[in-house]
Image (cartoon, rainbow, N blue to C red):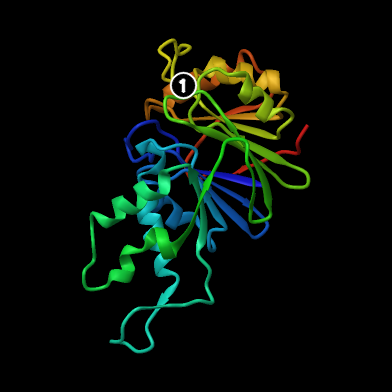
Amino acid sequence: MRLTPLGCLAAMPASGLASSGYLVEHGDTRVLLDAGPGVAARLSAVRTGRLSAVYVSHEHTDHILDLLVIGKTVLAERLRREDEHGPLILDEDIPPVPLYVPRGAVARLRALAGLYPVVTHPLLDRAFEVGFDCREYEPGERLLLGELEASTALLDHSAPNCGIRLESRDSSLVYTGDTGVTDALVTLAEGAGTLLSESTLRETDRSGHGHLSSLDAGRAARAAGVADLVLTHFSSPDPAEHRWHRDRAASVFDGPVSTARPDIAHPVPTSR
């Protein structure tokens, strides 16, 4: 299994870095975790084949805003013309890409797409009907994303957020989405190969909004007994700030700690 970060920032893109988005590959399976602003462009630069599935952890703009763009991209892959000037028609031999989103999200995504109609080619407005096969999941639900088995768990954030665990035969990756300190993360990540954890704050969140500091992430990695820890969802694009977070996490977790670097692939180690 291989993890390629496409973005690593909380909130909006800055200094050329995109918000949250991560490509996980295993064999012919390609799964996109979250689709924040800037992720669609980065995905187009690194993707080597069709997506097997897209998973969205929660409905905040820094994790979901590029879904419409990606949806139109996968929609375009299903369209063809019988002649140069003929109408766009759907190629039924190319399936839609499964999109897993929290309960209630599909109606909102379709409403968003409807705000920007292409009146001359109405088929182009159907990203969430034709490009994606939209599926609303429930916390705790188990999913099959291509060849990867997935389990979800409700974590601690101001919007309902489900972390996800992806498993192959010999490796596993856990992604937090956004969360505060919670035992549910430790349970989800137990014995995983890689914990891809948000590291938004310098200090533990006392506001109730639900974010982790690098120390919080390191402690969760230690408690879960993961093989390695990758930090992401930084508040600043400054590389020195990212290194600071890495060093803080490493002070409480004795496994390898790295920071998500866009387009740099990270091999997921064997699960413990």
Q: In this view, does 145 lie above or below 150?
A: below
Q: Write the residue at 40% across / 79% down.
A: 80
Direction from residue 241 to residue 258 in the image, left or right: right
Q: In this view, does 214 lie above or below 58?
A: above
Which is nearer the eye, 68 or 268? 68
Which is nearer the eye, 137 or 21? 137
- Tally of marks: 1
The answer to whether residue 66 shows anywhere in this view is no
Where in the figure is residue 239, as x and y percent of width and height?
42, 28
The answer to whether residue 43 shows anywhere in this view is yes
Where in the figure is residue 217, as x and y percent of width and height?
57, 21
Direction from residue 226 to residue 244 in the image, left or right: left
Direction from residue 69 to residue 268 in the image, left or right: right
Which is nearer the eye, 14 or 131? 131
Q: Write the residue at 27% across / 72% down.
A: 121
Question: Quick one: which residue is furthest to the bottom in this view?
Answer: 83
Q: Write the residue at 49% across / 17% down.
A: 213
Q: Determine whether the residue tagged by mark 1 lies in a helix, strand or loop.
A: loop
Q: Is residue 95 above or below residue 70?
A: below
Which is nearer the eye, 209 or 249? 209
Where in the figure is residue 199, as x and y percent of width and height?
49, 24
Identified by mark 1, the residue type is His
Label 1 neighbourhood size at 10 Å, few (<14), some (14-19), many (20+)?
many
Q: Disc 1 marks which residue?
A: 211
Where in the figure is residue 13, as x and y percent of width and height?
33, 37
Residue 208 figure quarter: top left
Q: Write the residue at 68% across / 55% down.
A: 147
Indicate the quadrant containing the C terminus: top left, top right, bottom left or bottom right: top right
